[in-house]
């Protein structure tokens, strides 16, 4: 069976600075992969490359066996199939919650305004924000804003979700409500790649945890094995530091 | 707790929204503070104005200045004609403003295109803004207003209204395009990433996400430019049209008196002061709407 997503020896530099140095990974349909690694290890860059927000220098990225990193390819249809949620939400501040969620289905998928809005209201309700639909993002808590951002991505019915440290800008007491949404997505069989500093959550939700170090995947394994029995010395050191910082 | 409130109950009469609820000690303090600063401001302003009113008439040349600049009867006589002439200024403003907005936005968008195919457009927009921002408006008006009718074209094409307006549009669209461009560039990259990640195209992102936010952000500097435009319309008088400045000049010669100029200044102020106040009002409303709380 072709993997949902396949990264084949992906390289990416910013100027002379190599950020991704040969990333290869196969992600099966409905699989959840958690990328962990220290700051600057390239987690965000990796996810942005998969969403084609960054172009890659070498290697290839496949979605359902089709090379989406081919030069000259129109990225827009690909992005419709891959949702992305950002650390800083990136909501549109001049639009209401409802408009944030219904904009892309209306403009990109060509749904009628009415259709896109009723679909958006359903999603907003599913994420527990019905009473906020007509408010503006600034009037919401961080956790609510991030849930709106997730709803905005889901409104496009993506086949894959990329979640880039979606809880690290949140107060601890708001993290739970966002993670609940991710749990629900997993139970619905969504394929997800997530970058996270929440080790406990990675352990719980991921099918595989991958350790990124200086733009390379040092190891990828089942969470129990990864956390209890890391193969690589650098992984051990990283987990050690995280444990000392009280995050595991 | 309540009895000590009643001591200060007099202070609450200042505010219109005095509700039945007893005021907290903090509110009482703030109101008293507010009233005190209001009184101080009022007293000091009155003192300064009073001093000016007393001192200026004591200067030796005051009676001459008063006669030739603040001459009541002449003001009465010339004011209606000035007002009528001002309608022309407003007309010119009203047809220039939309052209300037559209052209300015197009130029700003041209300067933002990244496609190499459209590079010439970008170059053109950059040259355009450099040229017209670098020339004083008055020179642009003189060059275009005297130069193009010199080509000897027939009626409506030799009209000074037309070419004066064109000159204003050229000059001001270059200023306005810079304002728009700054606004577009001030929108954080993450907004673009958010939009593109949803599958919106470059132009959809520009149209629905970047430009609406940019416009909101540049309304204050934009309105400043339009208040300037309102005033610079008067420069067209140099190439012929009888608008308010020209009319004031005619009346000045007729009465050998400068009061018509003061009249013209008053008319401008009657328009421009409410304009700027209105913008302030719009801005604070926008702030309240998007952020819920007003930060002082
Ligand atoms: N647009 C850019 N231009 C130049 N350098 C960049 C850019 N984006 C990222 N980098 C660099 O690439 C490296 C990897 O960044 P990236 O954001 O992918 O790390 P990360 O693993 O997500 O870190 P964090 O945990 O702090 O989010 C960093 O050294 C960063 O400085
Ligand atoms: Mg990151």
Image (cartoon, coloured by chain):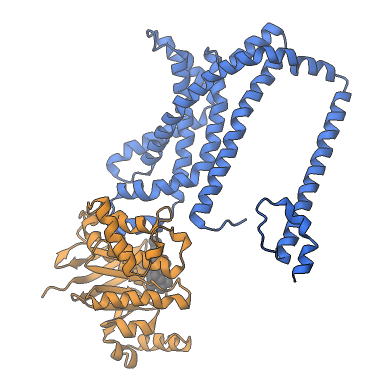
Chain colours: A orange, B blue
In the rendered image, which quarter contains the C terminus of chain A?
A: bottom left
To which quarter of the image does residue B84 belong?
Answer: top right
Q: Where is residue B174 in the image (x, y as percent from the top left)?
A: 46, 33
To which quarter of the image does residue B52 belong?
Answer: top right
To which quarter of the image does residue B195 belong?
Answer: bottom left
Q: Left or right? Give the position of B221 relative to B190.
A: right
In the rendered image, which quarter contains the N terminus of chain A?
A: bottom left
Q: Position of residue B254 (x, y in %)?
A: 67, 6
Is residue B78 or residue B11 the one in the foreground? B11
Q: Which residue is drawn at 32% across and 75% down?
A: A182
Tell me if residue A216 can be seen. no
Residue at the farthest bottom position = A229
Q: Left or right? Give the position of A231 relative to A159.
A: right
Tell me if residue B181 can be seen. yes
Is residue A134 or residue A159 the one in the foreground? A134
Q: Position of residue B223 (x, y in %)?
A: 53, 37
Residue at the farthest left position = A1
Q: On screen, B202 above or below B7?
A: above
């Amino acid at each position: 069976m072709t993997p949902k997503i396949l990264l084949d020896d992906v390289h990416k530099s910013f100027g002379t600075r190599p950020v991704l140095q040969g990333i290869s990974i196969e992600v099966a349909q409905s699989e959840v992969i958690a990328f962990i690694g220290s700051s600057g290890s390239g987690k965000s860059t990796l996810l942005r490359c998969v969403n084609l927000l960054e172009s890659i220098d070498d290697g290839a990225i496949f979605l359902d066996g089709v090379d989406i990193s081919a030069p000259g390819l129109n990225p827009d249809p690909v992005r419709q199939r891959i949702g992305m949620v950002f650390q800083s939400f990136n909501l549109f501040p001049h639009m209401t919650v409802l408009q944030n969620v219904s904009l892309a289905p209306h403009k990109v998928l060509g749904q009628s305004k009415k259709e896109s809005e009723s679909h958006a209201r359903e999603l907003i309700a599913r994420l527990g924000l019905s009473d906020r639909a007509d408010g503006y993002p600034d009037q919401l808590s961080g956790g609510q804003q991030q849930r709106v951002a997730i709803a905005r991505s889901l409104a496009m019915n993506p086949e894959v979700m990329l979640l880039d440290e979606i809880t690290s800008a949140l107060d601890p007491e708001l993290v739970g409500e966002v993670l609940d949404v991710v749990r629900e997505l997993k139970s619905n069989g969504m394929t997800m790649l997530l970058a996270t500093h929440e080790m406990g959550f990675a352990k719980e939700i991921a099918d595989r945890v991958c350790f990124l170090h200086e733009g390379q995947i040092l190891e990828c394994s089942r969470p129990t094995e990864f956390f209890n029995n890391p193969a690589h010395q650098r992984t051990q050191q990283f987990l050690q530091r995280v444990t000392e910082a009280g995050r595991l | 707790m309540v009895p000590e409130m009643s001591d200060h109950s007099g202070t609450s009469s200042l505010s219109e929204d005095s509700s039945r609820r007893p005021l907290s000690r903090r509110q009482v303090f703030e109101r008293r503070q507010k009233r005190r600063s209001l009184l101080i401001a009022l007293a000091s302003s009155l003192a300064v104005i009073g001093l000016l009113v007393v001192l200026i008439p004591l200067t030796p040349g005051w009676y001459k200045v008063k006669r030739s600049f603040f001459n009541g009867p002449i003001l009465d006589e010339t004011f209606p004609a000035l007002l009528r002439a001002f309608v022309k200024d407003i007309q010119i403003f009203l047809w220039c403003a939309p052209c300037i907005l559209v052209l300015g936005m197009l130029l700003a968008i041209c300067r933002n295109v990244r496609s190499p195919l459209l590079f010439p457009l970008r170059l053109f927009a950059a040259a355009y803004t450099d040229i017209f921002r670098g020339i004083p408006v008055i020179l642009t008006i003189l060059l275009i207003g005297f130069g193009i009718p010199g080509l000897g074209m027939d009626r409506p094409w030799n009209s000074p209204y037309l070419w004066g307006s064109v000159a204003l549009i050229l000059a001001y669209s270059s200023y306005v395009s810079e304002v728009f461009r700054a606004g577009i560039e001030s929108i954080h990259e993450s907004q673009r990433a958010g939009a593109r990640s949803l599958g919106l195209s470059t132009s959809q992102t520009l149209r629905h996400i970047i430009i609406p936010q940019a416009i909101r952000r540049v309304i204050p500097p934009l309105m400043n430019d339009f208040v300037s435009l309102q005033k610079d319309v008067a420069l067209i008088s140099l190439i012929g049209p009888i608008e308010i400045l020209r009319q004031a000049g005619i009346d000045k010669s007729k009465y050998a008196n400068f009061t018509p100029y003061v009249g013209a200044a008053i008319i401008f102020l009657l328009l421009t002061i409410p304009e700027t106040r209105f913008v302030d009002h719009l801005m604070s409303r926008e702030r309240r709407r998007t952020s819920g709380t007003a930060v002082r």
